[in-house]
Amino acid sequence: MPRRYPKVLGGLLLTAALAVSGGAALAAPEDALMPVEKYTTAKGKSLASAYRSRLLQFSSQIYNCLPWLAVYPGGLGFPQARGSQNDDRYLSTWIWVDQREDPAFAALSQERRVSAMFSRYGVDMLRRMAELSDVLDDRNVTGLSVVLSWLKPGTSLPGRQAVNETLALFVDKATVMDFLAKRVAPDEFTSRSRFTLFDGTDPVGRVPLEVWEDSFNSTYKVSTYEPPKGAHCQ
């Protein structure tokens, strides 16, 4: 299954970088890591250096085992939450979901599309990041973040400008671990989380977000794809 990154308008994770047009060449797993020189504080640089090999393993796992997803170049690292006035750092993964034009998906309201994408891909990605216990145990890591981008229905049709919908969510460590262990209900989890929806480059803001069980991302297999030898898929 071919995978292509959308061309991104803007630069670093969660600046603008939300509208797309066409595709760009696939990046290698190491290119998914946010470069150390892009961090603006000593804390960010220290985390990026200390856990580079761990994040490279994580990036390789997504690359080799989840061919319907792709990490944006520079989309895996320790950013601050957008608009944050402090230096809290989150282990964050920015995922491009290969969502093709589909009438059923297009018929959903925007809020329902966001809920469906987060339930299917966002929760599973938080679970995978939570398994990096050595990273999460670092006192300089405030929490986890997942950013999901997919093509807005109807915008990739001939004669149209392709546009992304993007959900960016940040949550503290205690809340996400309790949620994954089912000690915190989905509505409580969303109320404690900071998240923003973007329609192209336009911020929509916080929208109603429902979360439900969806095992697709952890169980789906592509019949024509075999992970490379030595890949540790789970």
Image: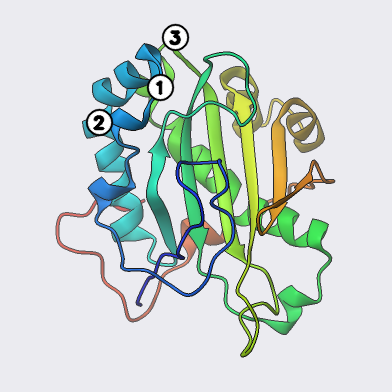
Label number found at residue 40: 1
Q: Is residue 100 left or right of residue 75?
A: right
Q: Residues within 10 Å of mark 2 (few under 14, many from 20)?
A: some
* Badge 2 amino acid: Arg
Vertical comparison of 118 with 152: above or below: above
Q: Earlier in the sequence, mark 1 or mark 3?
A: 1
Residue holding disc 3 = 139
Quarter of the image for residue 5 reads bottom left
How does the figure colour the protein chain or chains? rainbow
Residue at the image position 33 percent from the left and 47 percent from the top: 32
Label number found at residue 52: 2
**Where does the image place residue 70, in percent across and percent down from the top left?**
41, 59
- Tell me the SS state at disc 3: loop
Residues at marks 1 and 3, CA–CA distance in whole angstroms: 19 Å
Number of callouts: 3
Viewer-side residue, 134 vs 234: 134
